[in-house]
Amino acid sequence: MSGIRTAGDLVLRMQLAKSMKIDAAKQYVADKLGVKPIDLSDSDLMAEIRAKYGFGRSFDLNKSPKGIEAKFNIARKIGIKINSVELFMARAGLNKEGA
Amino acid sequence: MSEFFTRMGDGSGVYMTAEEIREDILKGVKDAADRGKIPELTQEEMDYLYKIITMPGNIVGVERGREVVSTSDSGSCKMTYHANIAMERSMAVLVSEKVLGADSVDIGNMDYSYKAVKQIIHNETPVMELAQLNAVMPVLYGSMPNLGLYTKPDGPVENWSELLPLAKIDEARAAQEEAVEHAVRDIVFVAGEMYAAGADGINLDTCGASGDADFLAGLLATEKIKEKYPDLGVEFGAAGEFVLGMHGKIEYDGAKIAGLYPHKQVKLAEKAGANIFGAVVNTNTNMSFPWNIARTVTFVKACTAAAEIPVHVNVGMGVGGIPMSEIPPIDVVTRADKALIEIGKADGL
């Protein structure tokens, strides 16, 4: 699907975390983003959506969320737990379980 | 009589007539259906496969909206170890993400085996930690169960490949069963360390490479990983279309593992708790691409129909209809992808 050029990373996350088949995974992500499943592979549209929600892009704009920062936004908007985000919060003392 | 350019299973170019292509498609479908005891493709599906194979253009693509996602086998190693570009692996992850548009990638070690990785895990986890700080897409850690590494003189158990020719069947079986215990322990250990380093998933790649005991090691490791780290995704990738019976009597969940084809392999992976199944269908280098892709699509269609979890078809050199060639030709690679997705209903590649 072209990864972060579109919504490929988000769809893959639903397969890996929830064992969703391709159509179900696309539908889930599309519903969360308020678009149609077919839109998820539109790199032009998805660039706008990724910028709007701070999901990270191939060519990041200055002062835009990157890497782990973007994954915080993805976890919140898509409604999934991302391991590295949970670990970041714990190790930075940002949650109850934090050091 | 017009001819179409296509390829043989070794990658060499060949011109075939429409009749020859249709005949090879039918033979490939029947071979898969006979071996796997699965339904043949319908006439409509074979007609569409013929259309894909003979489409004009060097490359072809799926219909808009039918795009699927991809996982990898030693994905970040392709640039570093294989192409010999002097690059740290977490940097290769970012190149995969930002330049190549990968949906995910796995980090692996040069010796892509859990046994080897266990001993250097303290140098592997920082690579994952750095990748997780900088990457947006899911990053997995991948390796093979590779049961053969547990045999003497490099490992602790007797070598069943030496015992079998001596007709020491019971000893060979006992050695494999002991190796399974070692492999499961190593895989679960590495998975735990990678989970603590932020990995999104663990890729158990090429399960069954050493036969049915190797496949069992992957299944038992998957069970334990999901029990200890329920949030860690597991991709269970097969080694071949048919699990070799090096042991011959090993069972999982009441099913004999030896001899299982993809549509039955996936059910065991599901039972163990895998999130994604990597289906493999081997390429015959002596047969044409139409024969190989028809056979592959028949197996994959049966596998995805049986599966409750997503199926990512292996489409590397020598599997998934792709020629056994170091540089897979893009003309047949794109045709294989289109056929596997649109006819085989693959959830990913």
Image: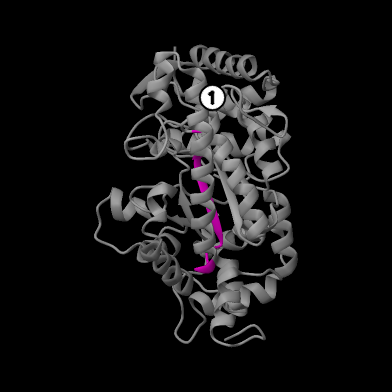
In the depicted structure, whether residue B134 falls above or below residue B48 = below
Q: In which quarter of the image is the N terminus of chain B?
A: top left
Which quadrant would residue B241 be assigned to in this image?
top right
Which percent across, then down, holds residue B233?
61, 56
- Looking at the image, which is closer to me, A37 or B134? B134
Q: Quadrant of the C terminus of chain B?
A: top right
Which percent across, then down, holds residue B274?
64, 47
* Residue B315 appears in the rendering: yes
Which region shows up in magenta? B196-208
Count of numbered labels shown in the rendering: 1
In the depicted structure, whether residue B208 falls above or below residue A20 = above
- Going 47% across and 52% down the picture, which residue do you hit? B142
Q: Is residue B203 covered in magenta? A: yes
- Looking at the image, which is closer to me, B303 or B186? B186
- Looking at the image, which is closer to me, B197 or B162? B162
* Residue B104 appears in the rendering: no
At label 1, which amino acid type do we have? His
Which percent across, then down, holds residue B252?
67, 33
Asked which secondary structure carries label 1, the reply is loop
- Going 57% across and 77% down the picture, which residue do you hit? A51
Instruction: Name the residue that disc number 1 marks.
Output: B247
Which percent across, then down, holds residue A86?
61, 75
Q: Which colour scheme is used?
A: one colour
- Looking at the image, which is closer to me, A1 or B299? B299
Q: Is residue B128 covered in magenta? A: no
Residue B306 left/right relative to B88: right
- Going 54% across and 82% down the picture, which residue do you hit? A91
Which quadrant would residue B200 be assigned to in this image?
bottom right
